[in-house]
């Protein structure tokens, strides 16, 4: 009789452990146009579109680099869903009978590099040469916006 009770308890524990789910978190980064090298928190994760798993919520720094386009850096806030806030998160992650997927998508529009005409570069160089000969260099007002 005691052996049967222990077997039932063991079977119940085995079934409980087999049915316990978990949380899968995934961050997908898409760029327009595609093909940019993506970095999350200064770690290369691949070429867009690309997905990577993550464990912790918070602010992630996403950087995209592509030839012919300006490098884009975005601070993306990834907040935990309501069911993954303490103390609920313990029960959801350890005792929820099914798998939970938390998938986040970051879309980034990339801007083509501005090509400066050669005559504009030469004019700016001549202007700087004249200013240095006079002992004064005044930054161009529109340089901060370029």
Image (tube, helix red, strand yellow):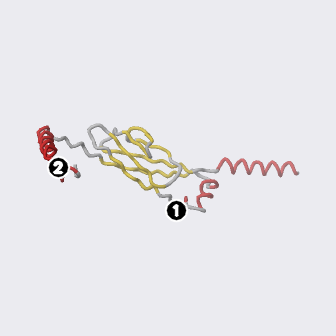
Marker disc for residue 82: 1
- Using the numbered discs, state the Cα–Cα distance from disc 1 to disc 2 in whole angstroms: 59 Å
Along the viewing direction, whichever of 119 and 86 lies nearer the viewer: 119
Label 2 secondary element: loop
Residue 98 location in percent, x, y? 59, 52
Label 1: how many Cα within 10 Å (few below 14, some 14–19, many 20+): few
| Residues at circles 1 and 2 in contact by the CB criterion of under 8 Å | no
Along the viewing direction, whichever of 17 and 23 lies nearer the viewer: 23
Label 2: how many Cα within 10 Å (few below 14, some 14–19, many 20+): few
In the current view of this chain or complex, which residue is farthest to the right? 1
Q: Residue at x 70, y 49 (%)?
A: 15
Above or below, 5 relative to 50: below
In the image: residue 118, left or right of residue 70:
left
Residue 80 location in percent, x, y? 50, 58
Label 1 secondary element: helix
Above or below, 118 relative to 146: above
What is the number of callouts on the image? Answer: 2
Q: Residue at x 50, y 45 (%)?
A: 53
Per the image, the residue denoted by label 2 is: 136
Residue 70 location in percent, x, y? 28, 44
In the image: residue 141, left or right of residue 43:
left
Residue 31 location in percent, x, y? 34, 45
**Which badge, 1 or 2, is on the more N-terminal residue?**
1
Q: Residue at x 40, y 46 (%)?
A: 29
Along the viewing direction, whichever of 74 and 3 lies nearer the viewer: 74
In the image: residue 107, left or right of residue 124:
right
Q: Nearer the viewer, mark 1 or mark 2?
A: 2
Marker disc for residue 32: none
Along the viewing direction, whichever of 112 and 142 lies nearer the viewer: 142
């Amino acid at each position: 009789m005691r052996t049967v009770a222990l077997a039932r308890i063991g079977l119940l524990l085995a079934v409980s452990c087999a049915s316990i789910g978990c949380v899968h978190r995934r961050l997908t980064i898409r760029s327009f146009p595609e093909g940019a090298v993506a970095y999350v928190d200064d770690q290369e994760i691949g070429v867009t579109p690309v997905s990577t798993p993550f464990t912790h919520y918070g602010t992630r720094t996403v950087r995209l680099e592509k030839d012919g386009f300006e490098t884009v850096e975005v601070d993306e806030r990834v907040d935990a869903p309501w069911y993954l806030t303490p103390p609920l998160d313990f029960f959801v992650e350890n005792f929820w009978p099914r798998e939970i997927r938390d998938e986040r998508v970051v879309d980034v529009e990339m801007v083509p590099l501005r090509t400066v005409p050669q005559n504009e570069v030469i004019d700016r160089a001549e202007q700087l040469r004249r200013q240095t000969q006079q002992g004064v260099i005044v930054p161009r007002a529109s340089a901060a916006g370029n």
